[in-house]
Image (cartoon, helix red, strand yellow):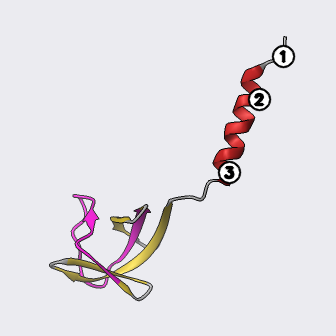
Amino acid sequence: MPNTHVGAFNYFAQVLQEQPSRTSTRVGVVTATSPFTVNLQGALLKNLGRDASYTPVVGHVVALERQDQTWMCVGRVVPG
């Protein structure tokens, strides 16, 4: 008896590969703390959500996550 689950898995794996990703990660620079504003490649993103443990400081380089059209600051990028 053939394993139909393998065929279904391959089909869904192919669909997922062909779907454009609606998420992305970028790096920006904090330009203001009130309202919280980040310069992302020349575009100013205002009133972003952020991780509660991060306190924004002007000039910090921060990591940003996007889901659809919503951006969130996930924290400071620290050289290592």
Q: State the separation of the CA atoms marked 2 and 3.
A: 15 Å
Q: On screen, 43 above or below 50?
A: below
> Crowding at label 1, few (<14), some or many (≥20) Cα neighbours within 10 Å?
few
Count of numbered circles in the view: 3
Question: Residue at label 3?
Answer: 17
Q: What x and y, as percent, mark residue 30?
A: 30, 81
Which residue, as the protein is rendered here, is positioned at the far bottom?
42
Q: Which residues are magenta?
A: 44-66
Question: Residue at label 2?
Answer: 7
Which residue, as the protein is rendered here, is positioned at the far right?
1
The earlier-in-sequence mark between 2 and 3 is 2
Residue sitting nearer the eye, 33 or 53: 33
Q: State the separation of the CA atoms marked 1 and 3.
A: 25 Å
Question: Residue at label 1?
Answer: 2
The residue drawn where x is 21% and y is 68% is 55
The residue drawn where x is 72% and y is 23% is 5
Q: What x and y, as percent, mark residue 6?
A: 76, 27
